[in-house]
Amino acid sequence: MPIEFDNNQPIYIQIMNYIKQQIISGKLNPGDKIDSVRELAVELQINPNTIQRTFQELEREGIVETRRGLGRYVTSEEVAIVSIKKEMAADLLGRFIQGMRDLGFKQDDIVTIVSEAVSKEEQK
Amino acid sequence: MINLLKYDWKRNANLIMGSAAALIIFQVAISFFGVTRNWPSALPLTFMFMGYCFAALMLIIFSFKTFSHNLKSYGRRLLPVASWKTIASPLLLQFVLSAGLSGLVLLHIWLFKWLSPSASLDALVPPTLKTGVLFFILIFWMVLFLMLLLYFSITVGNLFNKKLMPWVAIAVFVLLQFVISYAEKFLFNDDLFGAVDSELSSSSMSIFMSSTGDISVGNWGVMAFEIVIGAILVNIMLYLLNKKLDA
Amino acid sequence: MKKIVELQAVTKNYGSRKALHNINLNLEAGKIIGLLGSNGSGKSTLMKLAAGLIQPTSGTIRICGEPIGIGTKAVTSFMPDQPVTESWMRVKDALRFFSDFYKDFDQEKAGSMLDFLKLDRNDRISSLSKGMNERLQLTLAMSRQAKLYLLDEPIGGVDPVARGKILDAIVKFYNEDSCVLISTHLITDIERIFDEVLFIQNGEVSLRQDVESIRSKHGKSVDELFREVFSE
């Protein structure tokens, strides 16, 4: 199974994040066709209505669009995809910063640590 | 209905075919020893007769077992099939098999006559066609009525839990026998059929016993009475199957 | 939404033992519903009543608006806790048996499900392991185009690998206009395929909830909620 689900969190949110991640990581490209509800339900062993709800939410966020009689596609509007990227990055950063603060780091320390880590990563 | 019959047959096909083979081997062996060992002709005839009676009894037991199995079978009770077919299917199978058995008996009699023309078979052959037909109808009804009583008893028995079931079924059966024979004696003054010493057979059998001559009207009354009782039993069974009986 | 199952004041007693008490319940089309409860809580009894295998002591049951009878049996597909096949049958005989009696039995679907679950048509049912037999019973139940599916512990006796396959099969082969009721005590493995769950305790429905709202409102899995409710 491609996702490890956490039964304590709403499943549709977890699948939304899974699809967003696939878009960001380039596994799904703008304009790609998305699996049908039934296919995804079988693949993930999830209730089809939950998948349906996931798609509805993704449509509302403008990430997925339905073309009549053809199925669902990842939006080809770059803006929407950029905004997911920003949103997910903000989410990740928020959690990271909160974690660092919990460890007792100050704002400057965090910036230093991050820039050191990034430059080390680049040297590799 | 034919589908139900098919599966009643398939479940028991091996047993039935095996028993049929055993019966035929038994009958052949009896005839063979009868001829080679020079038994008095009455002896193989008696064995023959007993063999076929035993086979007929087996068919009764088989039919009863099939019915009671189907009452409790999830696979059967879930089927979208009218309840009367649950009753009719094992009965029909029993009568089809009985017809087969009768055919075997006739074939055997014919062979017997052909092989030993001197032997007397008068005891087995009805004196006239009319009594032959009557005999057939009466045997048919007698067995059918007996089966309905057996089916009814096990249906009522199954309303109770597993422990009580056989006792209730036996009690219902004995009680029905007693009540019906008493009622027949009371209504039709049927002397030949004592209420107390009644066997499994129904009293319409008595028509045959007295039937070398005429059939008295009273005995047809007995049969009509039994048909009414049978119809009532079937309707109660259908009600129980549809509304009360848990699988 | 279209009502598939309607129970009104349904009570079932076995002799003096009360199995279900005054159940009122409606189940709609398009839902997969989990029926959760400890052993002897009345899960199987509820299913057997809806399937028409047993009769209520009082109350009325309707399937698709009809009282229980031939008509409702024709649209209800039940996988009970014991086989509906007979021991003399081979797998192919069981398929034949179903297609002889159920007009909605789909041979093609059954065939692909057999392949999916790795069952051989020529195997004798009496020689199948418990897990394989459960797969067969599930195949028979799911290969019908029914309005109501009742699956009693479909993953009870099988190993985790087979469990995955069976869940796959349920999601893959169920029909969207129908209602699927699944009883289980193995909640974690299966809770993600439910829309709703019904908790049944001492013969009564103690809770009915949408599973995603259990997760979003309580931040809990169905399994956790079940443990809480039933430890009381």
Image (cartoon, coloured by chain):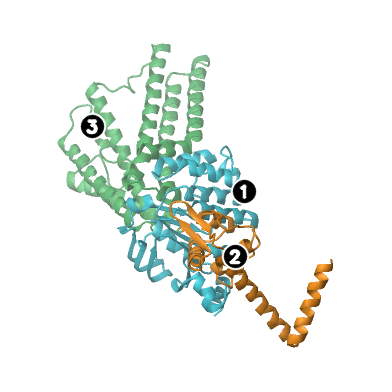
Chain colours: A orange, B green, C cyan
Where residue A105 sits, quadrant-wise, is bottom right
Residue under label 3, please give it.
B210
**Which element carries disc 2, helix, strand or loop?**
helix
Query: Label 2 amino acid?
Result: Lys
Looking at the image, the residue that sits furthest to the left is: B217
Q: Amino acid at mark 3?
A: Ser
Determine the residue positioned at 21% across, 45% down: B228
Mark 2 packing: few (<14 Cα in 10 Å), some, or many (20+)? many
Q: Residues within 10 Å of mark 3 (few under 14, many from 20)?
A: few
Which of the two discs, 2 and 3, sits closer to the camera? 2
Where is A86 relative to A107, above or below?
above
Rendered image quadrant of residue C168: bottom right
**Which one is nearer the viewer's eye here, A97 or A5?**
A97
Please tell me which residue is depicted at 55% across the width and 44% down the height of the picture. Answer: C114
Instruction: Write down the residue under mark 1.
Output: C129
x 49%, y 44%: residue: C109
Indicate which disc residue A20 carries.
Answer: 2
Q: Chain of mark 3?
A: B
